[in-house]
Amino acid sequence: MEHGAREVVAIVTHGILSGNALEALNGSRLSRVVVTNTVPHEEKKAECAKLETIDVSATLAEACRRTHNGESVSFLFNHAVG
């Protein structure tokens, strides 16, 4: 923000959000904190309006399927799933 950013968004995988994390996020200059749904955090969303969720279940399921069938998992890096 001191260098011209209009907003700062944090993208978080496996957001544990323990201790004083919500207090720190609420007091931060982050406009949004986007977390994957790999850890339950619905109750924490009530305490922090900045939290948003991305559902990664389809991507994880496809990675498991590809592993099971001996297919490339790295394919998923460049091809979005469902």
Image: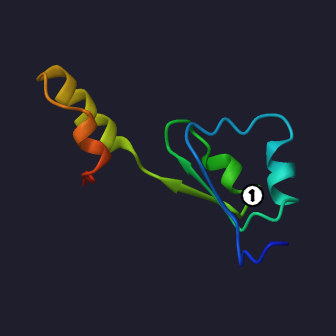
Residue 2 vertical position relative to residue 40 in the rendered view, above or below: below
Query: Is residue 64 found left or right of 31 in the rendered image?
Result: left
Tell me what residue is drawn at x 70 percent, y 63 percent: 50
Q: Compared to 76, does 26 lie above or below?
A: below
Amino acid type at circle 1 is: Cys
Image quadrant where one finds the C terminus: bottom left
Q: Residue at x 56, y 36 (%)?
A: 39
Camera-nearest residue between 12 and 46: 12
Q: Position of residue 27 (x, y in %)?
A: 88, 59
Position of residue 76 relative to residue 82, above or below, is above
Does residue 38 sit above or below 9 in this rendering? Answer: above
> x and y percent of residue 48 in the render?
75, 58
Residue at x-position 80% and y-position 54%: 25
Which residue is the site of mark 1? Answer: 48
Q: Is 71 on the left-hand or right-hand side of 26?
A: left
The image quadrant of residue 76 is top left
**Residue in the picture at 70% in, 73% down:** 7
Q: Nearer the viewer, residue 2 or 60?
A: 2
Q: Is residue 72 left or right of residue 44?
A: left
**Image quarter of the N terminus:** bottom right
Q: Quadrant of residue 73?
A: top left
- Residue 66: x and y, percent? 18, 30
Given residues 36 and 10, the one toward you in this image is 10
